[in-house]
Image: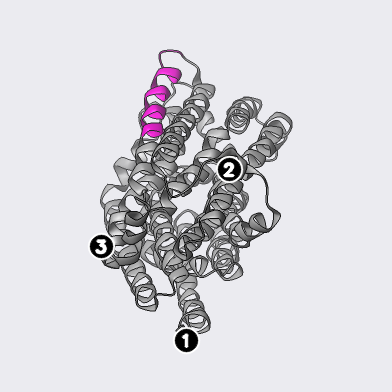
Amino acid sequence: MKKEKQNKMAIMPVNKLIWKMGLPMIISMVLQALYNVIDSIFVTNIKGIGVLANEALTYAFPIQILIIAIGVGTGIGLNSLLSKSLGEKEQDKVNKIAGNGIFLSICIYIIFLLFGLLGSHKFITLFTTNPEVVKMGTAYLRICTCVSFGAIGFSVYERLLQSTGKTMLSTIAQVSGAITNIVLDYIFIYPLKMNVEGAAWATVIGQIVSLVVAMFFHYRNNKEINGNLKYLKPNINLIKAIYVIGISATIMQALLAVMMAGVNIILNLSEINPSILVGAFGIYYKIQQVALFSAFGLSNTIISILAYNYGMKDKKRINNCIKFGIIDTIIVMIIITILFELFAQPLANLFGLASGTSKQMILLCVRALRISSLGFAFMGVSVAIQGVLQSIRYALRPLMISLLRLIIFVFPIAYLFIKTNNASSLVWWTFPIAEVLTCIISLFILKKSYQQKIENMV
């Protein structure tokens, strides 16, 4: 079995391999994004308190992004190193890398457990003084952090499956959790009237289900990796190697939280209905994550395939992976752009138009979706290039791309637009402008990186 799975990433035509491995990864990443989207849809439709509940979840959302960021960042570092070592056929190193990944997930969970117990209330009060919003936001955030071991653990076991080519199994695990989340969201929020706390419990239970299923598949099917407990022993050199890529990947993901918090602050500077702008942005950004996480899914596919072949020093397959990885990402992003343009109104309406969310907020969300989606194809190119750079063991360059598209361009452009008389229309152009500028710079970074690490490969 080991030989068969290694051969798939070594000899299957790259254009077919990217779709074969990539589609399950896209589904898996989109479902991860949908945890928060589903929570928001159910919560926003709670009669009487839906608008305030959505505001509470919007303020808690950056920490949820941070949990995902650290889990996914660690997983990307693990995936890159593990796939490369599998390609090099260093079996003992493979086992130790996997064990250290599991050890790191335990450490990360302890950190978020402490934050949940000690810091949830303080974090929510950074953004609002409304006592009802603070109460709901604190309760939601405390549950999501104190029971975050499902999300964090799944990020690692998912990568253990993906690094050996078993992307379908990781997707089945993700689907299991997502279905659990949807069913429990309805039961907890409506019949049991648990409101915001019900949404939080539905989320964490769904994440635990995904973790349990992924662990089952890993220990039953992943024969390429020895799951003996002795490999959990921490190895400083391997942890450093994981985080050569993992730290930058974590920061890249965490910048999503920084960007969202920063844009919330900028929108609050508006002289006209800042709360409506913040609410519309919160809804838009959760829907937008479907596109972003689809791009991440293909980027993760690039990491697995390219890192494996980089370990084998197969230049032809490396070139094909870069070419088809970028082209296929553009195709997926164009499809999502068309869908967002066509269905922006019904997507926005899911977030409580019938239960009290203002029509103005919904209209702003529709405008945000239609304008911002014009930058998705450019975003896809930048994210795909980040995957290429991580595969060939660059850390700072993909981080720079994230800084450009999420912070360096976004904050000043958004600030300039929010100070105009037509802020509610212009501010959404911040995102496609930032994506276009970042894409141009990313292509130059890719060209230079290729010349340094691949062009002269023997």
Which quarter of the figure has residue 371? bottom left
- CA–CA distance in space, label 1 to label 3: 26 Å
Name the disc covering residue 16, or none.
3
Amino acid at the residue labelled 2:
Ile
Residue 180 lies in the magenta-colored region = yes
Q: Which residue bears the numbered disc 2?
A: 102
Q: Which residue bears the numbered disc 1?
A: 456
Q: SS of the residue at dot 2? A: helix
Spot occupied by residue 49 in the image (x, y as percentages of width and height): 50, 24
| Magenta stretch bounds | 176-192
Spot occupied by residue 283 in the image (x, y as percentages of width and height): 45, 42
Q: Is residue 25 left or right of residue 116?
A: left
Amino acid at the residue labelled 3:
Lys
- CA–CA distance in space, label 3 to label 2: 31 Å
Is 109 rendered above or below residue 225?
above
Residue 388 lies in the magenta-colored region = no
- CA–CA distance in space, label 2 to label 1: 36 Å
Q: Quadrant of the C terminus?
A: bottom left
10 Å crowding of disc 1: few (<14), some (14-19), many (20+): few
Residue beneath the point at 45% across and 18% down: 188
Residue beneath the point at 43% across and 59% down: 304
Q: Is residue 267 left or right of residue 32?
A: right
Residue beneath the point at 66% across and 44% down: 233
Mark closest to the chain's N terminus, 2 or 1: 2
